[in-house]
Amino acid sequence: MKKVKIGLIGFGTVGTGVVKLLKRNKELIAEKTGVLPVIEKIADLDITTDRGVEIPDGILTTNINDVLNNPDIDVVIELVGGTTYARDFVEKALKNGKAVVTANKALLADCGEDLFNLAYEKSLDFYYEASVAGGIPIIKALRESLSSNNINTVYGILNGTCNYILSRMEDEGTAFDEILKDAQKAGYAEADPTFDIDGIDTAHKTIVLASLAFGNWFNMDDVHVEGIRGIDLLDFKYAAKLGYRIKLLSIIKNTSDGIEMSVRPTLVPADSLIGSVHGVYNCVWINSDWLGNSMYYGQGAGEKATASAVVSDVIDIALNLKNNASNRIPAFTKGTRFKGLLGEENSRGRFYLRIQLANRPGVFGEIATVFGEYGISLASVDQKEIDQNKKMAQVVVLTHDANQNSLNSALEKIRQFDEAGKNIVVFKIEDFE
Amino acid sequence: MKKVKIGLIGFGTVGTGVVKLLKRNKELIAEKTGVLPVIEKIADLDITTDRGVEIPDGILTTNINDVLNNPDIDVVIELVGGTTYARDFVEKALKNGKAVVTANKALLADCGEDLFNLAYEKSLDFYYEASVAGGIPIIKALRESLSSNNINTVYGILNGTCNYILSRMEDEGTAFDEILKDAQKAGYAEADPTFDIDGIDTAHKTIVLASLAFGNWFNMDDVHVEGIRGIDLLDFKYAAKLGYRIKLLSIIKNTSDGIEMSVRPTLVPADSLIGSVHGVYNCVWINSDWLGNSMYYGQGAGEKATASAVVSDVIDIALNLKNNASNRIPAFTKGTRFKGLLGEENSRGRFYLRIQLANRPGVFGEIATVFGEYGISLASVDQKEIDQNKKMAQVVVLTHDANQNSLNSALEKIRQFDEAGKNIVVFKIEDFE
């Protein structure tokens, strides 16, 4: 039985899950895989709080060097999060000849390529299954199962907090702010929810998926990001009537003019598989040239699911160490197939628009005329409740496939109609056809 | 670049897909993985039919020994299907020191363990990703990504032909026989559809999944199998009214009293993810102790999707050969965790029953009394259209959780009520709770 010694950095929720899993399912892992991962050291600033799992003496330490400079340790698991310390720890671990497992998407989005290069130079494994979609084995699927496929499109629901909030807004008709507060109380949202609800976390994960898919390490400047703050309940209602739900979607498309990468609230068909992913669940939907459509679904966060992904990486590394086959599959391989970015302004799609204007004779005709000028053809126009007192007209428009740039120009012109027109709601629609 | 030489046995639909994929995406595979799989020989009885792909001279052969005894060949892909010849070919390939890839679930269900033992003795890889759920990377997920997890439950839609027929019956209200004929014309069903529609193919795949999950190689006697022949349109209609769809489900449950394995038409919630898997698509839904619920979805058959799975195995083997790490993960590991089978008669579940009886005063009361006698509690009873001329009564009953044995006894008693009662329709319900 090959024993592999682990140094864990970060004894928070996921770290605790990893320790518990390696303890409780020790025999199972050994029986299934022939390797035995053993926790050698756990480094954290807080080593006194009870995590509900018994730790033998001599394992816990507040001194990071007990992990990084420990000659007995084969694998370092980095679970501190953030970029500053985490980068330092990962670099030192690799320089000291230790394989690394991380769940840190922010770190990978920030400096993934440098770290992969370092791991490659040192012939060390550096794995990150838990960084995207929590427990769902999507990194292994992309890196290994789909390695013979050209990736055409990736859609992801990658942030459980956002999906929880959007699902509840939709199901209950309760406003964003109230549900956010609830989610914070229930532990589904952070005290500072910016990273989640402004789409930054989803963008980090989008970078990891797109980089792996296209053999080029991307960064935040390459992703168009919109979050879910301020989504109006009215749009859930109108979307539902049209057969759609609103999801914060990670969208990666390999178009003939370049790679499109965006994170945005998107209308998806209510009866589609992605439309059926509710609450804190995540999913990744992939279209590739040989496998066709495939989808991977599961828990995107949480102590147990994320620990399962971390431990699957540890086992992979242990099997490589057992067979003297480190770097059997590099964490990331730079390729020649990336030809450039599409750019948000050049992207295309169908759009849902909610336009509010002062009601006067002929105003709808004028709107339609503007869209026509910019070559945008309309799939449906639906006039909504008109407030006779305020003399406001509201119209929901679905377009056919249109260019983002042309749409922006048309909307700019419509915004000049009157003061009310300044707040046009715009969502892209993805139909998975 | 590590070149790996392949001998392909069986140049049918999937074999042709493999040849095309390795040709068209050759550079992509090399760039992503650092290995280059090359077709060295293709053996088939028919080497003259044009498969739409150009084959260089000297590759095609009708002599199986050009593959099996060829010292240049590293990996044999077995795609002849069936058990007799396939077993002989796989055994000879392994005995001659060649790694093997197969898509043959019938072979694995029949003698998987013997073949795995042989591969293990010879320290050779023997992979079978394409044997279950076509292109979906479910074998790798179970074997690697979930190797730290105890598997509680597996549900699968594993036969595209059946799911295509059931989806169309449901959507169009067209009878089984007519859709089967259509499916045969369209190439979605075989001329002899027995293996598919009688659930045998799904049972083979169930054996592969359960064996991998529980570390014990099962056989057909261990699986309770019911097919979809003769399903009545009426039951789709009644199920839909109750919020259910009917799917041919592979069901594997690790209960405290043993492993339950069955294949049967099952009512699943229409708004569940599994209920949303339509047409020729497959899915596997897993509940495990750390990852929780996860689902894997994609094309369960076809030239391209299945070829993608076969080639992913070839690449895994090539990476092992490159790193002198053959048998890095054994194809199957016998474990100690299997404690016995539950047996169909001891299984539990909720049931959908459609009972037809001669209509006479008090008949429903009598039925309810019988269920009560056997401790079966009813969730709903719905009296359906009564044919006044024939004096027939029809009732649809949903039970609460009940023992299969008790249900069988109760139904036996109800069948004795009158001649009409002999044809009681019984489906299990799975709610994914």
Image (cartoon, coloured by chain):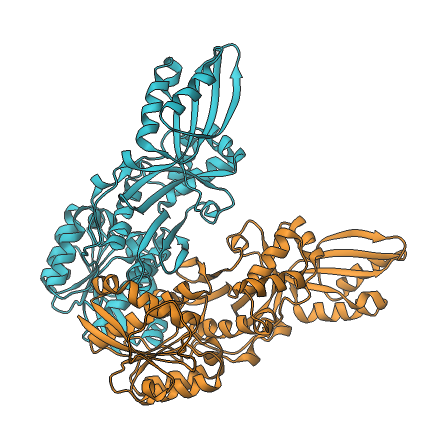
Chain colours: A orange, B cyan
Seen from the viewer's position, the closer of residues A338 and A430 is A430
Foreground: A159 or B68?
A: A159
Q: Residue at x 71, y 60 (%)?
A: A353
Residue drawn at the location 40% of the way across and 24% of the way down = B372
For the N terminus of chain A, which image quadrant? bottom left
Residue at 43%, 85% (x, y): give it: A87
Rendered position, B227 above or below A199:
above
Count of residue discs: 0
Q: Is residue A167 left or right of residue B412?
A: right
* Residue A258 in sight in this render: no
Residue B341 at what x, y percent from top left?
A: 23, 43
Q: Quadrant of residue A311?
A: bottom left
Estimate the x, y position of residue B178 in percent, counting from the top left.
Answer: 43, 31
Asked where in the image residue A250 lies, by quadrant, the reply is bottom right
Q: Give how far across and how far down residue B155 sits, in percent.
A: 37, 47
Asked if residue B223 can be seen in this view, the reply is yes
Residue A229 located left or right of residue A413? left
| The C terminus of chain A - image quarter | bottom right
Q: Closest to the observer: B87 or B395?
A: B395
Q: At which x and y percent is residue A261?
A: 55, 72
Q: Nearer the viewer, residue B244 or B283?
A: B244
In this rendering, is residue B182 above or below B53? above
